[in-house]
Image (cartoon, grey):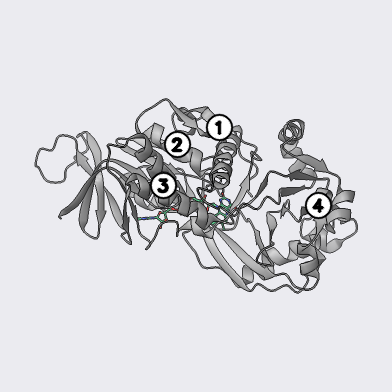
Amino acid sequence: MSIVSDYDVLVVGGGILGLASAYYIKLYNRELSVAIVEKEKDVGQGNTARSVGGYRQGIFTSRVNQVLAETSVQHLREADASGEARLGMNEVGYLIVMDRDRYAKVADIVRNFVETGKAELIEPRKLSEYLALNTNFEGDEEAEMLGIGNVVYGLFAPKCGYLDVEKVVGLYKKRCVDHGVEFILGKQVEKIVLEPVQPLGIPNEPRAWQKAKVAGVLLNGEKITSRFTVVAAGSWCPELLDPIGVDCFVKPKKRQLFVITASGELENLLNTVWADGRRLPMIFFPNGAYVVPRHREKSFWVSLTDEIGRKFSLDNEPEPSYFYENVYPPIVKYFPQFANARPSAMWAGNYSMNYLDGNPLVFKFLNCLVVTGASGSGVMKSDAVGRIAEAALFDKPYAVLHGGVKFDVSILGIEDRKVDREYFIL
Ligand SMILES: Cc1cc2nc3c(=O)[nH]c(=O)nc-3n(C[C@H](O)[C@H](O)[C@H](O)COP(=O)(O)OP(=O)(O)OC[C@H]3O[C@@H](n4cnc5c(N)ncnc54)[C@H](O)[C@@H]3O)c2cc1C
């Protein structure tokens, strides 16, 4: 085995979390050599590339996720406004449609969103009037069979929308390049290499009684050594960490997106203008179905976030039957304009799901940091997570998020984790 390179910090995974982490590590520690190793030909080609790019200014039930998203989105807004990068931020708003059950779970936090002016509650009658949305399913046996109940409210959050994920990747990639982060692209880490802190030169080191450290990684039989390793491999983290007995509390959950061209009645729906001259928002239904209007592309992206019954696996193959059997039936109930819709394109990716609480995980073992568990909203939380990763790697108690917000790093760790549960995993 030959050693090809040696770095102070080696980041495994060039997704948005790896990029943001590498950037802040290098920014605040300029003297260190930092590299990102990525198995794809370029960064941002994993699940980051498969994202909708939705962003929410604070519309999470976990207060921690609120802070991560609020500060990150504000950071992106300012990068966009300053001309550093044009991120294609399309502020159409999020409309979270609530039936009785969903509302009951989140009533307190919703009240708080309304009181703090982050969102407003819209009556079902107005939703029907403004958006031509079906909200009353009384006597509809098909709806009952589909588990669709009457809508009790729409929670509308205006300071949300979607952005161009590729541009966000470009922003952090450029920052990394400008600050001297190196890229090792098209190389897959086969394993994380453990070594004894004090080698004795005997076979099978480190033995169980030896103090171990992460010495680096193995790439096509070649070793890259590093003083610190950051594992930011998204939903692939368990593949790298399970073999060395480290639990990252994350599992890959497949998510699929289907593109529907907006023609005929769907074009009218796409062009809906409602309160205050707003355009059709992104709409999230209680059973996991959602509709994202892509105004510029004259299409809708639709999906359904399924849970029990969907196995954990690193599967990126979209299934056309999933659209017809699972996504289409509920969506057409809410919006009959989708009748006979057929997808013109589709893709699939994986959420790196932390099912315990739905907040990211940033924790250290030995001299290695794990940054994962974005649970379906990693793009919109990336700036904050990158800053927290930098602080956690160097054992700083606090990270300073965008706007000077002080964040206790242990909150996202394992030992002293202090997060509330996220119910808005959309
Ligand atoms: C369908 C879908 C819709 C989504 N919608 C949104 C949304 O609207 N808003 C939002 O904020 N988030 C959304 N997300 C979630 C978001 O995409 C993720 O939270 C985010 O991309 C996670 O970033 P990451 O860097 O952790 O993972 P990734 O982007 O997956 O990056 C991990 C990287 O590690 C690399 N890698 C893995 N193993 C190895 C190895 N052994 N060697 C070298 N490299 C390796 C991979 O190739 C990959 O590039 C969505 C995700 C999906 C799948």
Residue 244 picture quarter: top left
- Label 1, secondary structure: give it: loop
Could one spot residue 247 in this view of the protein?
no
Residue 333 picture quarter: bottom right
- Say what amino acid the circle numbered 2 marks: Arg
Q: Which mark is residue 277?
A: 4
Query: Mark 3 against mark 2, which lies toward the viewer?
Result: 3
Residue occupying the point 55% across, 68% down: 318
From the viewer's perspective, is residue 337 above or below residue 374?
below
Front-most of residues 317 and 15: 15
Q: Determine whether, in the image, residue 54 is placed left or right of residue 31.
A: right
- Say what amino acid the circle numbered 1 marks: Val
Sequence order check: which comes first, mark 4 or mark 1?
4
Measure the alpha-carbon separation of dots 3 and 1.
30 Å
Residue hosting label 3:
175
- Label 4, secondary structure: give it: helix
Front-most of residues 362 and 29: 29
Measure the alpha-carbon separation of dots 4 and 1.
37 Å
From the viewer's perspective, is residue 74 above or below residue 172?
above
Q: Neighbour class for label 4 at 10 Å: few (<14), some, many (≥20)?
A: few
Residue 386 position within the rendered picture, expressed as x and y whole percent measured from the top left: 45, 40
